[in-house]
């Protein structure tokens, strides 16, 4: 994930979206504007079979847990996507 993770200093809740209370930064792994990020993942494909990998980079305005709690509409924005098929 790429996100700014905050901790609520009063409740200890991580992640928190309660930025109006006193919070502290746990980590910030966001991708900067006009920047790039690259990750490598390895999967074991079944021998003699075809495998398709679907990749999406989503922009999500809040953590899914907070979206579910607040019953907000799902408004993920697909920033990039790719499909890769491999055969062994």
Image (tube, rainbow, N blue to C red):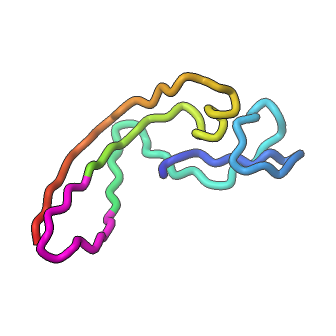
Vertical order, 71 against 58 (above or below): above
The foreground one among 32 and 56 is 56
Q: Quarter-wise, where is residue 27 in the image?
A: bottom right
The reply to whether the magenta stretch includes residue 51 is yes
Q: At 72% across and 42% down in the image, what residue appears? A: 16
| In this rendering, position of residue 6 left or right of residue 63 | right
| In this rendering, position of residue 25 left or right of residue 61 | right
Q: At 35% across and 33% down in the image, what residue appears? A: 78
Image spot of residue 42 (x, y percent): 30, 70
Q: Quarter-wise, where is residue 53 in the image?
A: bottom left
The reply to whether the magenta stretch includes residue 75 is no
User: Which residues make up the magenta segment?
Assistant: 40-53
The quarter of the image holding the C terminus is bottom left
Vertical order, 86 against 31 (above or below): below
- Is most of the magenta stretch helix, strand or loop? loop
Image spot of residue 30 (x, y percent): 49, 46
The foreground one among 42 and 34 is 42
Image spot of residue 61 (x, y percent): 54, 31
| In this rendering, position of residue 69 left or right of residue 3 | right
Residue furthest to the bottom:
47
Q: How many marks?
A: 0
Vertical order, 46 against 84 (above or below): below
Image spot of residue 48 (x, y percent): 12, 74
Q: At 51% across and 27% down in the image, what residue appears? A: 74
Residue furthest to the top:
73
């Amino acid at each position: 994930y790429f996100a700014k993770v905050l901790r609520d200093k009063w409740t200890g809740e991580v992640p928190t979206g309660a930025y109006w209370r006193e919070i502290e930064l746990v980590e910030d792994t966001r991708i900067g504007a006009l920047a790039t990020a690259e990750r490598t993942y390895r999967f074991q494909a079944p021998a003699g079979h075809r495998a398709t990998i679907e990749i999406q980079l989503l922009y999500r305005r809040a953590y899914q847990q907070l979206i579910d709690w607040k019953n907000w509409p799902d408004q993920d924005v697909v920033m990039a996507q790719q499909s890769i098929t491999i055969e062994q």
